[in-house]
Amino acid sequence: MSAPFKGIISYPVTPFDKATGRVDLPAVRGLIDRLVERGSHGIAPLGSTGESAYLDDTEWDAVAEASIQQVGKRLPVIVGISDLTTRNAVRKAKFAEAAGADAVMVLPVSYWKLSDDEIFRHYATISQAVGVPIMVYNNPATSGVDMKPELIVRIVKDIENATMVKESSGDIQRMHTLRQLSDGGIPFFNGSNPLALEAFAAGAIGWCTAAPNLIPDWPLALYDTCTAGDLDRARDVFYAQLPILRFILQGGLPTTIKAGLGLRGFEAGVPRAPLLGLGAEGVQTLQALLKAIDARPQPGRN
């Protein structure tokens, strides 16, 4: 089984206008350009970093379309699909495919606890509706759904368009188990920032992360050094960025990334209520972390 994507898949936030609170489409396009031009291997709009759960359908469609158009086939685009209902998840997936997405990343979310069969049917129904590849996304912290490796392997083996996995549970053993159960046949991406180094060692073919919004050279350098087998340098590169990776995750990705973009001179507004912007103390901490990593020699690219 081959993976259509690899490397650093970057997650843009969804910028909002500070005055009106509406989606700022010019800023969406500007942020996409920043990520494309700074070396990302793929772009994944409308994930949890992109506050997809806080957009109505009209806004979601506008952001998906603008993001895909702005990438303009320069890189692969994986559009995040998460919805309580299979019906609207199918609608979003079909819209993304028609707009030109190269793949969709499907995160099942729940109010009532979903059985394995219900999750399987959710993916199967989406697969029947579209022809693009599906990334199976496990993120129990945000979705309320925890897919065990055995279910993920079943989905990828038995559903035609399900071709790759993003594992974000924060449990490195899940990645080892995925590899063992599939004899290394299922391409998987790391989705937990603090596990990036271990994930590459476990066989991840890429890392889906919001970090390139703030420190684009560092995730790319980690991927390059791991791919080259330079583990000593990979450790140095990873531990240099780990304090920022931990901070942006613990503080909430939309909140911390938007604050960090502001510190970097790019206005993305604040998160949508009930989320709050990063407080003054948090901004000071983030500013110090960015200043510290900026003072280090640039990691470079192989």
Image: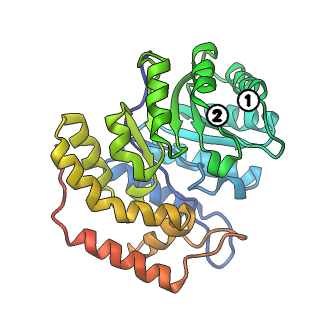
Name the disc covering residue 271, or none: none
Amino acid on which the number 1 mark rests in the picture: Ile
Q: Residue furthest right?
A: 112
* Mark 1 surroundings: few (<14), some (14-19) or many (≥20) residues within 10 A: many
Location of the N terminus by quadrant is: top left
Residue under numbered circle 1: 119
Nearest the viewer among 154 and 161 is: 154
Q: Residue at x 49, y 26 (%)?
A: 178
Whether the residues at callouts 2 and 1 have beta carbons within 8 Å, the answer is: yes
Q: Is residue 299 left or right of residue 210?
A: left
Q: Position of residue 302 (x, y in %)?
A: 16, 43
Q: Position of residue 288 (x, y in %)?
A: 34, 79
Element on which disc 2 rests: loop
Q: Position of residue 244 (x, y in %)?
A: 38, 65
Q: Residue at x 53, y 68 (%)?
A: 251
Q: Quadrant of residue 176?
A: top left
Q: Residue furthest front?
A: 173
Residue under numbered circle 2: 147
Element on which disc 1 rests: helix
Nearest the viewer among 284 and 235 is: 235
